[in-house]
């Protein structure tokens, strides 16, 4: 049985006097123990809301969550606040995008790490401090004894992110959710953080859900990749087939629009035309159809269902055939 | 007409660090740009890359004199741009335009697109009459791929990519020779990024523009540029054609940078060897002695690296590098070794053991 089973997760935001907004629309995926699963998509595709819904961090008012999130046999969505608090940090760890705003600015790093250890593992302050030092050491923070006494603003961006990873992994959770953990960092620091995460996840056998917009990060890290568009998973496959032969026109388009370092000189980029619409018209159509070079008439009339075709899960009426480039249209 | 359009000579920008409420003592300097020479040829795209804090944006702004440089000059089309004053400077600015990173905050939310575009035309007496101006605006919008109905709209009514197109149209309106684009696509989603990159390339061909593209994303810079300069902590460490730089990076920092960029291809990713740099970027207020990179360099040698600052020298035709041991590293004579990360002081970048000179407060000044 999978460690985490997300089934038909739907998040609808409702505000008085406004149309309800479906940020996540029936997302399903599994995470096996020790597996790394990627959720990829552009801004507004619902990848962060998915992670917040799993962690129970969405506001009670205004957000309607349906579906099931089964972790180790229990449905997390049915747990009370108190039960959920016991799980967060112990069974489920989370690393956020912006380390400065996720750390408390007026509490030293040391206390923020030991807080988790005291709360969930019942360690005394002294023991917890020793453990915290080991944790900081493990994530590669130089001179951890001194860093424990310092405040977040005294650390650089990369160090803060390391501290956050140390906090998330303090109780050796079986599942770690990382929401754009390296987006705010420079590439050389990103490489450091990714290698730390890769190592720790392997050592501790933690399952990782990696949420990112960067297909390059996914290519190096994830076993299985879910590509999201407009709140739905449009393509799900193992990373090798996905990158070698993207079948969904959106995945295909994304890969064609990224300039690659190893590209031949003079190679043109093929952008996807238009941009993400604000409201997501999945009802009676494919939301990607207005931007899709492969769109048929049926795409504008029938919502495509998820089908197991071509060795992967695909939500498309007219998938890309490998070898033939998608019909190219120059956007205006 | 000479081939070189822009020549920057020993440009320096040092920002003073001030402390104190009334007395405003200068307690140090941030060496944001510290001695950069570069040349941009007519019609080419020069890419400037580096991580945050390396001074690439400050260099771009100093060239346009949006920040006054501390030292050095920029020669634009044979004229010393840094010596110009008043009306002459204003007239010259028409020929150098800028595209900013964040298209929403660089467009006035209360100005319609028409008024944004016309403003520059009026300032430089290019508004010769209603009809010709109208035609010009329409041409501009067509050139950047926006419908002419956009003229009446306001910036908030557009998506991120379209806003960046407006920013580009504004720069184009004055028929400039040089466009300085500071992170033109980094605020955009990848699918939209490609649209803007392609647009910039098309416009360059159409209007014979020269670009200086400043970005942190080496993949984007490599794609769009003819020549690329890599900056580290206020100085240029390597300069080469985009292909050469990728094929054979000579500076250790460039090597590490190239190896750190994720490639969206699992086959490549699994095979790649990463050069992980230890630690963080040192503070530009307190830069390391000698070669700025020696504190993190896996190829660091016992002599010269920490005492002598290497100059940019030509190792191959068209390929310059600022490293004492570039030849030996290239031939494999020097092998990389492990580097222990050193602590980087955050905050004001002042080392705690430097005594402050002068009174610390008004009371102290009055009662010595």
Image (cartoon, rainbow, N blue to C red):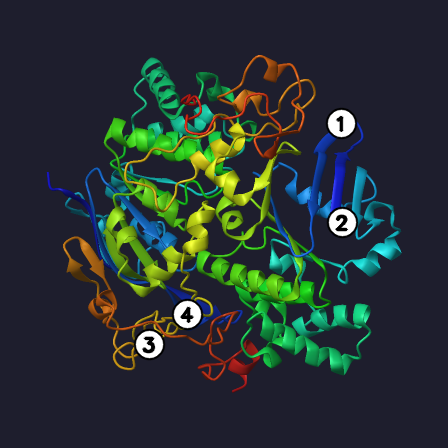
In the rendered image, residue A7, in percent from the top left (x then y), is placed at 76, 39
Give the residue number, with chain letter if any, for mark 1: A18
Alpha-carbon neighbours of circle 3 within 10 Å: few (<14), some, or many (≥20)?
some
Q: Quadrant of residue B184?
A: top left
Q: Nearer the viewer, mark 4 or mark 1?
A: 1
* Closer-to-camera residue (A59/A90): A90
Give the residue number, with chain letter if any, for mark 3: B289
Q: CA distance from mark 2 to mark 3?
A: 58 Å
Chain letter belonging to callout 3 = B
Alpha-carbon neighbours of circle 4 within 10 Å: few (<14), some, or many (≥20)?
many
Residue A1 disc label = 2
Q: CA distance from mark 4 to mark 1?
A: 51 Å
Quadrant housing the C terminus of chain A: top left
Tag 4 and tag 3, C-beta contact below 8 Å: no
Chain letter belonging to callout 4 = B
* Closer-to-camera residue (B4/A277): A277
Tag 2 and tag 3, C-beta contact below 8 Å: no
Tag 1 and tag 3, C-beta contact below 8 Å: no
Do the residues at discs 4 and 1 belong to one chain?
Answer: no
Q: Is residue B303 above or below residue B95?
A: below
* Closer-to-camera residue (B331/A155): B331
In the rendered image, residue B163, in percent from the top left (x then y), is placed at 48, 32
Q: CA distance from mark 4 to mark 3?
A: 12 Å
Give the residue number, with chain letter if any, for mark 4: B285
Question: Is residue B65 something that shows in the picture?
Answer: no
Nearest to N terminus: mark 2 or mark 1:
2
Q: Secondary structure at mark 1?
A: loop
Q: Nearer the viewer, mark 4 or mark 2?
A: 2
């Amino acid at each position: 049985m999978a460690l985490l089973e997300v089934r038909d997760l739907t998040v609808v935001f409702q505000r008085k006097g406004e149309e309800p907004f479906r940020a996540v629309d029936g997302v399903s995926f599994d995470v096996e123990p020790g597996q790394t699963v990627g959720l990829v998509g552009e801004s507004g595709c619902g990848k962060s809301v998915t992670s917040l819904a799993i962690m129970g961090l969405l506001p009670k008012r205004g957000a309607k969550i349906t579906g099931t999130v089964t972790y180790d046999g229990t449905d997390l969505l049915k747990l009370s606040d108190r039960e959920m608090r016991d799980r967060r940090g112990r069974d489920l760890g989370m690393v956020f995008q912006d380390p400065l705003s996720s750390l408390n600015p007026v509490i030293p790093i040391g206390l923020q790490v030991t807080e988790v250890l005291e709360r969930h593992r019942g360690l005394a302050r002294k023991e917890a401090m020793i453990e915290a030092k080991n944790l900081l050491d493990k994530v590669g923070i130089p001179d951890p004894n001194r860093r424990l006494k310092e405040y977040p603003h005294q650390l650089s961006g990369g160090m803060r992110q390391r501290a956050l990873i140390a906090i998330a992994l303090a109780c050796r959770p079986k599942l770690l959710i990382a929401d754009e953990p390296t987006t705010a960092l420079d590439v050389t620091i990103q490489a450091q953080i990714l290698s730390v995460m890769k190592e720790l996840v392997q050592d501790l056998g933690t399952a990782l859900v990696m949420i990112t917009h960067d297909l390059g990060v996914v290519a190096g890290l994830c076993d299985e990749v879910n590509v999201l568009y407009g709140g739905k998973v449009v393509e799900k496959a193992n990373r090798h087939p996905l990158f070698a032969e993207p079948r969904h026109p959106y995945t295909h388009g994304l890969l064609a629009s990224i300039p690659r370092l190893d590209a031949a000189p003079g190679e043109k980029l093929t952008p996807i035309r238009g941009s993400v619409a604000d409201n997501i018209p999945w009802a009676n159509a494919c939301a990607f159809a207005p931007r899709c070079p492969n769109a048929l008439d049926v795409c504008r009339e029938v919502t495509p269902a998820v089908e197991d075709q071509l060795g992967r899960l695909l939500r498309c009426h007219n998938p890309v055939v490998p070898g033939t480039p998608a019909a190219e249209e120059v956007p205006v | 007409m000479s081939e070189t359009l822009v020549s920057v000579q020993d440009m320096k920008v040092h920002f003073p660090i001030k402390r104190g409420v009334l007395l405003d003592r200068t307690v140090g300097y941030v060496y944001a740009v510290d001695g950069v020479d570069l040349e941009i040829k007519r019609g080419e795209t020069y890419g400037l890359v580096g991580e945050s804090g390396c001074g690439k944006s400050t260099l771009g702004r100093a060239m346009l004199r949006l920040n006054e440089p501390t030292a050095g000059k920029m020669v634009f089309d044979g004229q010393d741009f840094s010596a110009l004053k008043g009306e002459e400077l204003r007239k010259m600015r028409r020929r150098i335009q800028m595209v900013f990173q964040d298209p929403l905050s660089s467009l006035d939310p209360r100005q319609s697109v028409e008024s944004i575009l016309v403003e520059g035309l009026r300032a430089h007496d290019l508004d010769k009459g209603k009809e010709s101006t109208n035609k010009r605006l329409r041409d501009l919008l067509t050139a950047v791929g926006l419908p002419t109905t956009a003229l009446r709209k306001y910036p908030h009514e557009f998506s991120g990519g379209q806003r960046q197109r407006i920013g580009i149209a504004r720069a184009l309106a004055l028929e400039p020779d040089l466009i300085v684009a500071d992170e033109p696509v980094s605020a955009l989603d990848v699918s939209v990024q490609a649209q803007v990159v392609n647009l910039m390339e098309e416009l360059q061909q159409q209007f014979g523009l020269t670009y200086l593209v400043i970005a942190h994303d080496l993949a984007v810079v490599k794609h769009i540029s003819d020549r690329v300069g890599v900056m580290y902590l206020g100085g240029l460490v390597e300069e080469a054609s985009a292909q050469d730089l990728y094929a054979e990076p000579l500076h250790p920092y460039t090597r590490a940078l190239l190896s750190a960029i994720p490639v969206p291809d699992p086959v490549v990713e699994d095979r790649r060897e990463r050069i992980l740099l230890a630690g963080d970027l040192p503070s530009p207020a307190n830069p390391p002695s000698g070669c700025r990179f020696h504190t993190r360099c896996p190829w660091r040698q016992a002599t010269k690296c920490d005492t002598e600052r290497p100059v940019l020298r030509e190792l191959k035709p068209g390929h310059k590098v600022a490293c004492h041991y570039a030849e030996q590293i290239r031939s494999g004579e020097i092998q990389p070794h492990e580097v222990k990360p050193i602590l980087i002081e955050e905050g004001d970048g002042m080392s705690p053991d430097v005594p402050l000179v002068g009174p610390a407060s008004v009371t102290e000044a009055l009662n010595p």
